[in-house]
Image (cartoon, rainbow, N blue to C red):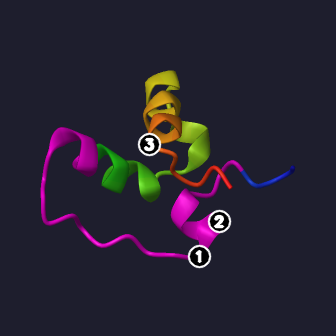
Amino acid sequence: MSFDKAKSLEELEGEKMEKPDFQSSLTLSVYRLWSTPLNLYSTEDLRLMIGQNISLE
């Protein structure tokens, strides 16, 4: 699979994520990372998103 790593998941999926009502560190991190370009993700960011099954399909 090939995709532009300079794009965010928001851009690749074509879906905007609403700010979570419940503001835990986990939900706020996922919310922040959703609009962050993939090439700026740290290893920990990747682990977090994979662990939450975000955009794995």
Q: Residue 32 — which label?
A: none
Residue 6 colored magenta?
yes
Helix, strand or loop at mark 3: loop
**Quadrant showing the C terminus:** bottom right
Q: Residue 14 — which label?
A: 1
Crowdedness near tag 1: few (<14), some (14–19) or many (≥20) residues, C-alpha within 10 Å = few
Could you tell me the amino acid type at mark 2? Leu
Are dots 2 and 1 in contact, CB under 8 Å? Answer: yes
- The Cα–Cα distance between marks 2 and 3, rounded to whole angstroms, is 18 Å
Could you tell me the amino acid type at mark 3? Gln
Helix, strand or loop at mark 2: helix
Residue 23 colored magenta?
yes
Q: Is residue 27 left or right of residue 23?
A: right
x, y percent for residue 42? 49, 28
- The Cα–Cα distance between marks 2 and 1, rounded to whole angstroms, is 6 Å
Could you tell me the amino acid type at mark 1? Gly
Q: Mark 1 or mark 3: name the one nearer the start of the chain.
A: 1
- Residue for point 61% across, 69% down: 13
Helix, strand or loop at mark 1: loop
Q: Which residue is mark 3?
A: 52
x, y percent for residue 19? 24, 67
Q: Is residue 29 above or below residue 17?
A: above
Range drawn in magenta: 5-28
Q: Mark 2 or mark 3: name the one nearer the start of the chain.
A: 2
Q: Which residue is mark 2?
A: 12
x, y percent for residue 30? 36, 49
Q: Is residue 44 left or right of residue 25?
A: right
